[in-house]
């Protein structure tokens, strides 16, 4: 069987963010035959503007669209900024949704993981990210949700992959994405 590729887009640009570390955990716990790629470069993608889309070559946008186009599934990992999805992640979704109806996210399985220091686990951002990805054309997995709260105490300065419970939960999300790619291919 061929390798399955999952593209992880992280809603925090901070190098040491817990959400980035959760995406790195997905890389570490991916089953054999699955490659999870954490996309670097969202900070270089300009805000979506239809006036510049397709008019000039924008290397950061081309790299994002190509990575999303090559991926079999998408994993969106998000913190919560002021009660909603961070602009950088929403912007990435906007770019990969275009051209409308044929963008790189169209009909791809999508799962969302959210995390925050609050006990809420960034659930509002989680819901908004799921909504945006669905409207953009992704096939958001209905029964796959992971919102991790209390990250400051839970990880206590350690990498999330060192927390066996979280590592197992992230592995289950990645496995669900892989299963969905196979189901969609068979349909």
Image (cartoon, rainbow, N blue to C red):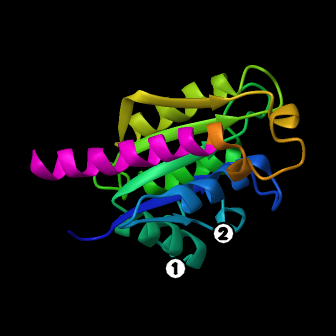
Outermost top residue: 120
Left or right: 122 with respect to 140? right
Distance (Cα) linking label 2 and label 1: 16 Å
State the residue at coordinates (33%, 51%): 178
Judging by the rendered image, the residue that carries numbered circle 1 is: 57
* Quadrant position of the N terminus in the picture: bottom left
Residues at circles 2 and 1 in contact by the CB criterion of under 8 Å:
no
Chain part drawn in magenta: 167-187
Outermost front residue: 164
State the residue at coordinates (34%, 42%): 137
Instruction: Give SS at disc 2.
Output: loop
Instruction: Give SS at disc 1.
Output: loop
Percent x, y of residue 142: 37, 27
Quadrant in the picture for residue 187: top left
Specify few, some or many for label 2: CA neighbours under 10 Å numbering under 14, 14-19, or 20 or more: few
Quadrant in the picture for residue 28: bottom right
State the residue at coordinates (68%, 52%): 161
Q: Is residue 180 magenta?
A: yes
Judging by the rendered image, the residue that carries numbered circle 2 is: 41
Q: Is residue 27 magenta?
A: no
């Amino acid at each position: 069987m061929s390798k399955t590729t999952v593209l992880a887009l992280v809603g925090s640009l901070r190098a040491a963010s817990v959400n980035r570390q959760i995406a790195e955990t997905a890389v570490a716990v991916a089953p054999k035959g699955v490659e999870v790629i954490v996309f670097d470069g969202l900070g270089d993608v300009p805000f979506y503007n239809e006036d510049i889309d397709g008019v000039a070559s924008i290397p950061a946008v081309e790299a994002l669209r190509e990575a999303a186009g090559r991926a079999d599934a998408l994993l969106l990992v998000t913190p919560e900024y002021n009660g909603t999805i961070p602009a950088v992640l929403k912007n990435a979704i906007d770019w990969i949704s275009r051209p409308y109806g044929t963008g790189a996210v169209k009909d791809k399985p999508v799962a969302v993981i959210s995390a925050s220091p609050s006990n809420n686990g960034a659930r509002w951002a989680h819901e908004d990210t799921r909504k945006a990805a669905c409207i953009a054309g992704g096939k958001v997995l209905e029964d796959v949700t992971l919102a991790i709260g209390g990250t400051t105490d839970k990880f206590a300065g350690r990498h999330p992959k060192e927390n066996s419970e979280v590592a197992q939960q992230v592995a289950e999300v990645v496995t669900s994405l892989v299963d969905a790619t196979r189901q969609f291919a068979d349909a």
